[in-house]
Image (cartoon, grey):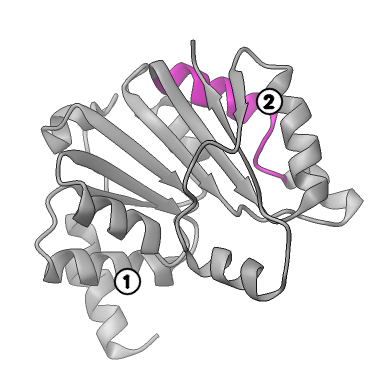
Amino acid sequence: MSASRERTLRELLPNFEISGLERPIDLAKVFNREMVIVDFGSGMGLHALSLASSSPDVGVLAIDVHTVGLLAIAEIATEQELTNLRTHHGDGMDVFTDWLKPESIAEVHVLFPDPWPKARHHKRRLISQLFLDQVFALLKPGGRMVFVTDDESYFESASATIAAHKFRVIQSDWDIPMTTYHQRAVRLGHKISQLSAYKS
């Protein structure tokens, strides 16, 4: 890791990290904003940063297991003096299990998660009964989870899992942001599929 990244990890990222907050965390109070969006698997942070900068009345929590993207978020958010952005470095399942106040999240965005294409790895895919239970418990009534993928097999299986849950599902009603993975999917000519799962 470069010296500048080490500095960001040591000095900047802790200013955004939620792991030290008292639980259950009420992100609406942390942000002092009623609407909170979770970018689950935020990658290089383009979507989270765009949301936070373009919608100052919205609080954004960026979650990712990889460090590099969160460092980029911390650097840019610091430069832009964004007060409505927080991060978590991890796979996010701990956060969704018992860190957050129930029915406190307006939207969960799951954009281009790892499709784990090999059949023996399908059990590692994010969209599962357990994950959907966690999302449902965290969403406010009327809140939604947006799921986007360029893997047709994953979309088919995830759609079936979500349809079997308590969500109300609507296809293709969201303007997908041009993230790094979205750009890659377009470049490779992949079909991009999406759905929104609403908590009634």
**110 on left or right of 46:** right
Amino acid beneath label 1? Ala
Picture coordinates of residue 156 (x, y %)? 80, 39
Q: Residues within 10 Å of mark 1 (few under 14, many from 20)?
A: many
Q: How many marks?
A: 2
- Which residue is more in the foreground, 158 or 22? 158
- Magenta span: predominant SS is helix
Report which quarter residue 160 is drawn in.
top right
Towards the viewer: 129 or 185:
185
Q: Which residues are magenta?
A: 125-139
Taking the image as shown, residue 191 lies to the left or right of residue 101, namely right
> Hey, which residue is sitting farthest right in the picture?
119
Front disc: 1 or 2? 2
Q: Which mark is residue 148?
A: none
Which of disc 2 and disc 1 is earlier in sequence? 1
Residue 134, image x, y percentages: 52, 24
Residue at point 47%, 42% (across, down): 109
Q: Amino acid at mark 2?
A: Ile
Q: Residue at x 71, y 74 (%)?
A: 188
> Which percent across, then down, holds residue 198?
51, 21
Relative to 183, is 193 above or below? above
Disc number for residue 72: 1
Q: Is residue 19 visible?
A: no
Disc 2 target residue = 162
| Label 2 CA crowd tier, 10 Å (few <14, some 14–19, many 20+) | many
- Label 2's element? helix
Magenta region includes residue 82: no
